[in-house]
Image (spheres, coloured by chain):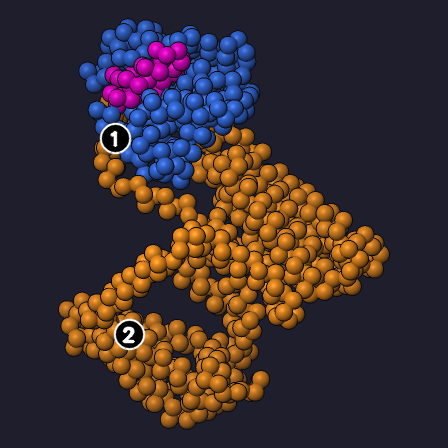
Chain colours: A orange, B blue
Amino acid sequence: MNKDIIRTSSRKGLLFGIVLIFLVLINFHIMASTMISKLLGTNVLRGAFPEVRFMIIFLVIYGLWAGWSAVSRENKTTTKLLEGLISGITTGIVIVLFGLILFFLLETQTDVRRYLTALSFVSINIFLLGLRGAGVPVLFGLFTLTGLLGGALAIGLRSKTVSNFKHSIKAFVSNVRQSITSALPEFVTKYGKYMIYLVLLALLLLLPSRWGSYNNFVFGMVGLYVILGIGLNIMLGLSGQFMIGIAALFAMGAYSVALLNSPFPHGLMWGFWPSLVVGVVMAVIGGLLLGLPIMRLRGDYLGIVTLGFGEIIRILLNSDLLTDLTGGPRGIQNIQQPTFLGRPFNDVSYAYLIIVAMAVSIFLYYRLEKSRTGRAWLSIKEDTLVARATGVDVQKYKLLALCIGAAFAGLAGGIFAARNQFTGPNDHTLMVSINVLSVVIVGGLNSIPGIILGSFALRGLPELLRELETYRLLVFGALLVFMMLVRPDGLWPSSRPNLEEKGSSDLKEDIDPDLEGRGND
Amino acid sequence: MLKVTDLNVYYGAIHALKGISFDLQEGEIVTLIGANGAGKSTLLNTVSGILHAKEGTVEYLGENISNEAPQVIVQKGIVQVPEGRKIFAKMTVMENLEMGAYTVTDRQQIQDKREAMFDRFPVLRTRSKQLGGTLSGGEQQMLAMARALMANPKLLLLDEPSMGLAPVLVEQIFDIIQDINQQGTSVLLVEQNAHMALSIADRAYVLETGHIVLEGDASVVMNDPMVISAYLGG
């Protein structure tokens, strides 16, 4: 029993130690201390390193976490403390070993930045608390102590009294909510949902002209990703086609608008509105051309081919050969700005344009989802063979999904290019496709609120928290893993799966497990 | 009504059906029995257009349908209930039924048809808002059959409706099949449960590794010594 405790909690500690090593190797401890110092209101000069004490806060929190997570639910209080302590000590030992290596590097002035770019002497020095060799035992002490404290904290916060307290709070809140609902006049409870929509709509109409061009830029980005997400969702969520190359379709829209509205390379000036239509049509044609050869592919294979398609388009755009045609690696500059009723566009008009485009996309999406076509897509996604057997023309509808999804992507691309007044191959990398995929998956497949939430979480927040930029991929990965564990259906899942809960689970009994019906073989 | 002549079907290099010929008259229940891998499901999939024959023809009401797409064949009135029930688990019972009537575009007709199905399978009415996947095995089989009937079939292709069901449910399902047949739908029934199949069928064909080895009236086939020893556990 005791051995078991030692094994499991030291394993936890080991994990935390190793993760911390990786975090230090990518300079995350500096990042964390910068963030903490900002939270505490200390102004850090851009580019300057924050003080050691902020990193200590980070390490203490990390150590507490390590101790906390090692504590199991069932055991006695003393055992819990022991678990926290063991976890802390293990983390400490790992960090001591790592610290000794760092100290050695520091002493011999070995520069390892050729292999580990982030591991500079300054970074090492800060991790060793500025104490050089003496920092190693201090770190050990810190993790042992915080591990123990974390264990103690877990006892305090996971005990029965606390959970009882939580329950009573929950009951209280729901009571209050109920009494409020019953106290409110009927029209509020009945139309409350619509009133919230109205408020949101009013905000959407008022905010763009009030909150400055930077916020408009971020908002526009979120909006464009919502449109892209809807497009991808039609392919992935409704018809079940694993599409990764949506950046290529996005590029078709963007390049159509760019090439028809810039002095170089063609000198065409068609104006924004007709070229946006061309962009959408081009994207649809792209979807069709992509769709025809891949109709027989499914699942991962489809993913690989579409990914390849996306890269082919980007590489073509990037090639010197096609410079005369597409502007080559330098992209297309000075895209002519649209006018609306004779007035030129500014950031506010783009925000409104994107709101309108978003609204149209959402409306079309809902109409499609509820239509016969939507039903056919859903059946294809669920079981292609049966869909075929019930009379659905599978090929036609799969192609249709690709084309309609592509139209949305083209729309987003066209607006994107005009708004940036520039587009180039780097706007259409694989990362764009992956971002859109993440938006849809993280937000919730087949759920418009989910897609909006997802694109805000994945596109809006990183823009607002610029400091995290370097760690975006790390955060992305962590977020995706976290989502799979905690909310596998997305942040705001579609309501369809909830239907399942209404059906009772005791209905399965008359399926015969031994397949008795075929006993005569 | 259905006339299959010298059918040869391949999966890549595998020769699954080796020159099958059989026919089905209007109003009949014809059963195809045989062990795993005999080619029963392949045959059904070929008739319904999901697979296409390399040689041979499928004639339906005097018309060659060998190369038609499945959705065309459904429209002509041949509807398949696939093996293993295969209902749409993430759709409600109602939506499953509406999917069945996919080739029907008249709303009123769909509604009437749905009501008729609820009358025939009352349990589906009580479950109409539930997801298909939450139904029990027997209910799923009923839903699969109801879904097929939604398309107004003249010929129903049933692929192992007894699969994985308890004996009492199997009997219930076979009663329903007989009932459907009496109301004017011809049935082509593929089964491993030879005893049940032969008891309701008019005529039977025995399939073995892609060949038809025996054919005749169901009562005759039932008393064939080979069939008794191989399929009826005699």
Identify the subunit bearing mark 2: A
Can I make out residue A313 in this image?
A: no
Say left or right for B194 vs A187: left
Characterize the local packing of mark 1: few (<14), some (14-19) or many (20 or more) Cα atoms within 10 angstroms: some
Q: Amino acid at mark 2?
A: Trp
Q: Residue at x 41, y 25 (%)?
A: B114
**C-alpha distance separating marks 1 and 2:** 49 Å
Q: Position of residue A87 (x, y in %)?
A: 27, 76
Which residue is more in the foreground, A140 or B74? B74
Q: Which residue is mark 1?
A: A515
- The first of marks 1 and 2 along the sequence is 2
How many discs appear?
2
Q: Which residues are magenta?
A: B170-197
Q: Position of residue A472 (x, y in %)?
A: 52, 68
Residue type for callout 1: Leu
Does B192 appear in magenta?
yes
Query: Could you tell me which quadrant the N terminus of chain A lies in?
Result: bottom left
Up the image or down, A2 lies above or below A220; here it is: below
User: Could you say whether the residue bearing mark 2 is in a helix, strand or loop?
Assistant: helix
Kindly report the secondary structure that dominates the magenta region of the rendered protein.
helix
Q: Quadrant of residue A72?
A: bottom left
Q: Do discs 1 and 2 share a chain? A: yes
Magenta segment includes A357: no
Which residue does the numbered mark 2 point to in the structure image?
A68
**Which residue lies at the image location 48% right of the left edge and 50% below the top edge?**
A447
The kind of secondary structure element at disc 1 is loop
Q: Chain of mark 1?
A: A
**Residue drawn 26% across the image and 42% down it:** A505
Query: Tag on residue B108?
Result: none
- Residue B234 in percent (x, y) is at 19, 15
